[in-house]
Amino acid sequence: MEYLNYFILSIYFVLFPLFLGGIIRKTRARSQSRRGPGVLQNLYDFLRLWQKNPIDGPNSALFAENAPITIFLSSIIVWSIVTFEWTSILIIPFFLALQRMCILGFAMETGTSFGGLGTSRELLLAICSEPILIMSLLVAQSKLQVGFNWLGILMGMLFLGAFMVAILAEIAKPPFDDPRTHLELTMVHEAMLLEASGRTLAYFEGAAQLKIASFLVLLMRVGIEHTNFDFRILFGGILENLAVYIGAIFLAVFLGYWEARSVRRKWIWVPEIMGMTFLFLLVLGTLIKI
């Protein structure tokens, strides 16, 4: 049964990032009364970009050559940690910091004004979101269990909601970023990738899809593993993994609808909501311990 479970996880590992981002795009289009691209359009875009050679700027050097593949490989490692749980999830922020350092270096190396604008905003998001993310992962790594009663469900939903705030900032979704915009006043993640093309852009886009899959599955795994009901006693954990990945698909649908209906907020709003979320997690953790 254990080997069967790992075989099914391997299938999830290969296939899930290919269509999860497409589900978000499809749901967003349907919410706006459009047909939208197919679920596998992200895969087609990746393969199309992979066949093209990148065009580097005159100031491109170390980061332009090494940052994209480093970000892509670290995203694969994070996705493997979330899928197979072969090590502690507390190591995930270190890989996220590596990715952020690489993409900031890539954006600053080109010397464009858009790159500097995007890096400054990305650093603000990182400073505000990483404390929430690290605290959420510390709680997720603990042995804390919530019961199937109204108080336990309420506490769990509040914690997952606060965790989702940090996830929205990490995967560049509204209200912190809008990946659909190309206006210099609203760009964050897109501003840092304006100089990327061809295979370089394919690495960045592939890493983004892996990050979306990693965080949505991680959120569902945290929510399910910290309940009193032990799914592992049924079919050796196969049922638990099935519930996690089905829940991640529903989260992708919700995220697509949220992206269609939400807008990016003013930057002065970002530190305030992040600070309030961090304080809320501290108060919530105190109440749970009591």
Image (cartoon, rainbow, N blue to C red):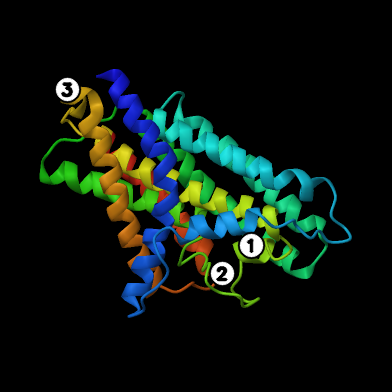
Q: Which residue is mark 3?
A: 233
Q: Of the residues tagged 1 and 2, which is closer to the observer? A: 1
Q: Position of residue 201 (x, y in %)?
A: 65, 57
**Which is nearer the eye, 222 or 241?**
241
Residue at (41%, 65%) from the top-left corner? 25
Callout 1: helix, strand or loop?
A: helix
Residue 54 shows in the view: yes
Q: Which residue is the extreme one toward the bottom?
A: 33
**Which is nearer the eye, 104 or 127?**
104
The N terminus: image quadrant: top left
Mark seen at residue 267: 2
Which of the two discs, 2 and 3, labels the residue nearer the N terminus?
3
Which of the two discs, 3 and 1, labels the residue nearer the N terminus?
1
The C terminus: image quadrant: top left
Q: Which residue is mark 1?
A: 121
**Which is nearer the eye, 267 or 258?**
258
Which of the two discs, 1 and 2, labels the residue nearer the N terminus?
1
Residue at (78%, 57%) from the top-left corner? 108
Q: Position of residue 222 (x, y in %)?
A: 32, 38
